[in-house]
Image (cartoon, rainbow, N blue to C red):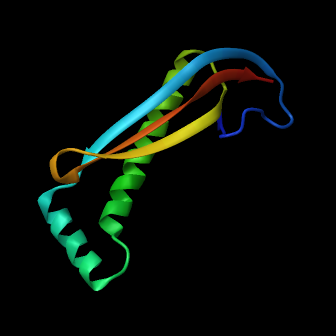
Amino acid sequence: MIITTTSTLEGYRIKKYLGIVTGETIVGVNVFKDMFAGITDVVGGRSGTYERELERARQLAFQEMEELAIQRGANAIIGVDLDYEVLGEKNGMMMVSVNGTAVIAE
């Protein structure tokens, strides 16, 4: 599956547009991870815990979007847009949403 943020695929012709496909994932970060991340923030540096959770959420959102495209018979997704949000009381949840247009390219 070709997935791109561009609206065209160099070297390919879009044969058919199959509609918008999306993927959303919401993940929570538990209190122990929050405490560790807080210590990292105080002493400086990057929070590997949050980075791993964000990467996991992004992968799940892309996987969901790709599965929907496959169900529609697509072999590519173009015009992909990725968005991040912090949700919940005390910002304890992260949401990743991704969307694009499923197409058949040849």
In the image, farthest residue toward the right: 11
- Count of marks placed on residues: 0
| Residue 36 vertical position relative to residue 62 in the rendered view, above or below | below
| Residue 28 vertical position relative to residue 3 in the rendered view, above or below | below
x%, y% of residue 100?
A: 58, 30
Name the residue located 66 percent from the left edge and 39 percent from the top edge. Answer: 4
Name the residue located 19 percent from the left edge and 64 percent from the top edge. Answer: 34
Question: Dividing the picture into quarters, in which one does residue 95 lie?
Answer: top left
Horizontally, residue 78 falls left or right of residue 48, namely right
Name the quadrant of the C terminus. Answer: top right
x%, y% of residue 103?
A: 68, 21
Name the residue located 35 percent from the left edge and 38 percent from the top edge. Answer: 25
| Residue 22 vertical position relative to residue 39 in the rendered view, above or below | above
Horizontally, residue 30 falls left or right of residue 40, namely left
| Residue 28 vertical position relative to residue 76 in the rendered view, above or below | below
Task: In this rendered view, identify the residue nearer to me: 103 or 83.
Answer: 83
In the image, farthest residue toward the left: 31
Horizontally, residue 62 falls left or right of residue 79, namely left
Name the quadrant of the N terminus. Answer: top right
x%, y% of residue 5?
A: 65, 40
Name the residue located 22 percent from the left edge and 52 percent from the top edge. Answer: 91
Question: Dividing the picture into quarters, in which one does residue 2 lie?
Answer: top right
x%, y% of residue 102?
A: 62, 23
In the image, farthest residue toward the front: 90
